[in-house]
Structure formats: structure tokens, C-alpha cells
Image (cartoon, rainbow, N blue to C red):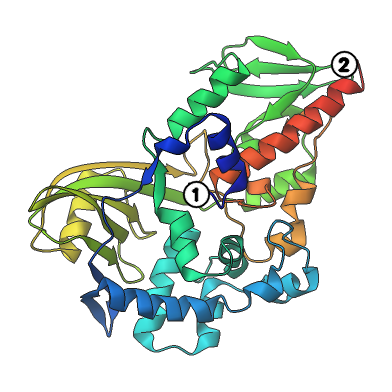
Amino acid sequence: MHWSQPHTWSEIMRYDLTGDVVDANAAPADWVLSAHGEGLEWTTAEAHAEREKALLDRFFEDSWRVFPRPYDPLHAAAAVAEVDQLTVRDRIDELDLAPDDAAHLSALLSTLSGEVAEKGSYTALLRWWALVGHGYDSLWLALASYKLKHGMTSLLDAILTDGGAEVRLSAPVQGLTSGDSGVEVTLATGEVISAGAAVVATPAGVWPYLEFSPELSSERLDAARAGLQSPRGSKGVVLLKGETRRIYVNSRPGDPLALLWTSHHRSPDEQVALFYCGPAMHDPDDPEEIGAAIRALLPDVEVLEVHSGSWGGDDEFTRGGWPILWPGQLSRLAPHQTLSRPEGRIAFASGEIASFWSSFIDGAIESGIRAGRDVREILGRTS
């Protein structure tokens, strides 16, 4: 989280949690392992940052023209349409980079977009760059530098306590029926809950798996089936022994482990590190496979513990990873406009349909604010 994410920061301010904002890592990395030549090579963090900044400045140099007002992603609709079909690979190829520079960008940006460079969307990542103010340092400050001391659960708990809502866990929803006078929500147990309106706040990939009556619009269902999320997201934490340096690893395209970096040291030669799996990781929930991928990159390191989590198409509550649009979807679907509209007495809230930080918690909160306005309007029509 970061104060450049306005909806998240507003809630942090509301619940007096600014004092809980801490650095995400004990200290920045001082050595980086990244693509050089046909393999990987260690460089100082300063040299890596200088190289990566120059590459990303070129990759994203169109951001002011395409997204001059990033809170309104189609403000420059013609400019968006010009580049919206480009994949990450298409854009890298346009730059005519040295092979190791192209490999570095491909690996890094594939991880951020949640898909290989040949499929990931250029404009999805261009929006991130514009949202942070069109700059390298501000990008990493917003994406990876700060967290809440007690986790995002502390913010969630504050919101729930303030709102006073009843929360039911282990109560999956089977379907929703929207009529002239209200909505009926049917749980998997068969219990039916009646209300004046409802908000569906699941990831978009879940929409086709819920039973709606009347059926959702074909536009919404087609978009959800095509995908508005990364196909899979996986990350975790490991305990490593034998590495005294603070490190950052950005592997080559196709490596099972995409990113790994030092969180903090427990002792001079024992450290806690965070990681993201790449698309080539067969089972991101398998500690043995993750350990093998780490040892392939860091052969002198002993992997003591592995804890990971993953979200994908077979997860009934997510049906994919984090929200991210695919090439052509922003200009063709305008999901922040078309898919954010209520259907009958059912409103929708999800990061995929946010105007601003659509891939982040901030986008989820933004869409929730809009859904709240929609519900108020729906209830006002029958009050």
C-alpha cells in the first residue's frame, strides 16, 4: 500500500492507522541477480537500478500521451486505441534492445502482468506507470516499499467493525434472484436471504459460476469468461541459510521462480525472503518444487522453510489471480464503465472494474464506493 493510492489511504486515515505504516523490508537489497548475456549475473543494486530505470523509462515513454489523466483511463481514447492491442513482447520488440536487456524486461514485466510477455498487456502496465506519476522510483515506492505493521487484515477489521455488518464465513453463495421488489440470495446450504439489493464483490472470474436470475448480460459474462484477471497468482515466504547479503533476484523468462528478495535477516547467515512464482512453476503450492527452483538460482543456499499461496482457475472463490486487463480489453470493453453498472437490483464491486488502481486493493475500495452509491439509488426508487 502507498499514499498515492487514494482510496486505500483515505481508509487508513479514517481508522487512524497511519502510525502502523512501516517499511516493507528491513533494508533495500545491496546485490541483484538478473539477466546478463545468456545467463544471470550479480551486480550492485545501484548498477541494477540505473540499468532498469533506463529500460523502463523507454518502455513506458508513451505514458503521458496515452494516460494523461490516469483516473480516467479513456480520457485520451484515440491514443489508448493505438496501443491497446500491444502485448508486452510487442512493445519490447519495438525498442530493439540488446538480448539481455530484452530478457530482463520480459521476465520482470511478465511477473507484474501475471502472464508471459507474449500475452501480457502493455497498456495494463502503462496505467500503473501513469498512476504513480510516470516515474521509476515512484513505481517501486507504490508497489513494494510499504505495508501495514499488522497486515491489511487490520484495515479490514477496522472497516468491518465500523460498518457493523454481519460476516458469515464458510457460507458460499449459489445464486441470486433479482426481482421488482428485492433480491434473494441462495446459499449452497439452501438457505435463502432476502434484501432490497445486493452487491456481488467477487473477482470477475467467479460471475459465470454463480446462478443469476435473470441471467447476467452477455457482455458481462463474455468478458468474465474471456478473463479480466491474471490466470494465476502465487507468492510466498522462505527461510534461507547461507546468504549473508541482502539480495534481489529477477530471473530469466521461463524460470519457475520469477522474483525473490530479502525481507530481513534473522542472523548473519539466515534470512527471510519473499518470492513470486513464474508461469513455468508447475505447482506453486509444492515446497519441494519451490525449493528446487531457489537452489537452481542460489546453489549455495539451504532452503529451511517454504510457505506459499496461490490463486488460479481451479479456486472456486477467485477463478484466477489479481485483476489485470488483456490486450484490447480496455478500449473494446471499457470495463470501468460498462461492467460497473448494476443489473436489476444487483450491484458489482471488484478491482477489475475500477477506474483508477484497477489491479490493487485501492481499486476494490473504489468500486465498493461506487456500488454503495448504486445500492442507495436502487433502494431510493422503492422507499
Marks 2/1 in contact by CB < 8 Å: the verdict is: no
Quick one: label 2, few (<14), some, or many (20+) residues within 10 Å?
Answer: few
Amino acid type at image mark 2: Ser
Comes first in the chain, label 2 or label 1: 1
Which quadrant would residue 41 be assigned to in this image? bottom left
Q: Residue at x 62, y 74 (%)?
A: 86
In percent of width and height, residue 344 lies at 84, 29
Q: Quadrant of residue 260?
A: bottom left
- Quadrant of image for the C terminus: top right
Image-based side of 91 in relation to 193, left or right = left
How busy is the neighbourhood of tag 1: few (under 14 within 10 Å), some, or many (20 plus)?
A: some
The residue at which mark 2 appears reads as 181
- Helix or strand or loop: what does disc 2 sit on? loop
Give the amino acid type for the residue marked by disc 1 in the picture: His
- Vertical order, 166 against 147 (above or below): above
Question: Which residue lies most toward the top here?
Answer: 191
Judge depth for marks 2 and 1 and give the one in front. Answer: 1
Q: What residue does disc 1 label?
A: 2
The disc label shown at residue 260, or none: none
The residue that appears at 38% across and 48% down in the rendered structure is 234
Instruction: Tell whether 87 sits left or right of 300.
Output: right
Q: Say if residue 49 shows up in the picture.
A: yes
Q: Nearer the viewer, residue 157 or 328?
A: 157
Instruction: Please name whichever residue, 121 or 361, is drawn nearer the observer in this view of the structure.
Output: 361
